[in-house]
Amino acid sequence: MSAGAVVSFAMECYERGIIKAEELEGLELNFSNGQSLVKILEMIGERRGIGNLLAEGSKRAAESWVLQN
């Protein structure tokens, strides 16, 4: 359940331009892109790239992105 929430949060952030495709290893993390959904879940499970931050949850990711901007 938490993984779904954090991926949904990341997709919303991607669609709003808060996170870029470069941060996602080129993934286009749109709600309609099922392949990217699987890849971002793999990144979270492996704690690879942005998946490391997303593995900490939506709150930590949001705090990190607010501090960067």
Image (spheres, rainbow, N blue to C red):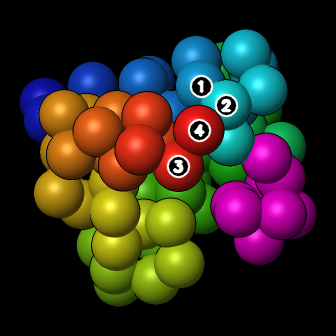
Instruction: Give the Cα distance between marks 4 and 3.
Output: 4 Å
- Graded by Cα atoms within 10 Å as few (under 14), some (14 to 19) or many (20 or more), the crowding at tag 1 reads some
Instruction: Determine if residue 34 is in view.
Output: no
Residue 13: percent from the left, percent from the top? 59, 25
Which numbered marker is on residue 69?
4
Nearer the observer, disc 3 or disc 2?
Answer: 3
Tag 1: amino acid: Cys
Residue in the picture at 35% in, 83% down: 46
SS for tag 2? Answer: loop
Instruction: Give the Cα distance between marks 4 and 1.
Output: 13 Å
Q: Quadrant of residue 7?
A: top left
Reply above or below: 33 against 68.
above
Residue in the picture at 42% in, 66% down: 51
Reply above or below: 46 against 59.
below
Tag 3: amino acid: Gln
SS for tag 4? Answer: loop
Residue stretch rendered in magenta on the structure: 20-27
Nearer the observer, disc 4 or disc 2?
Answer: 4
Residue 61: percent from the left, percent from the top? 33, 45
Residue, disc 3:
68
Residue, disc 1:
13
Residue, disc 2:
18
Tag 2: amino acid: Ile
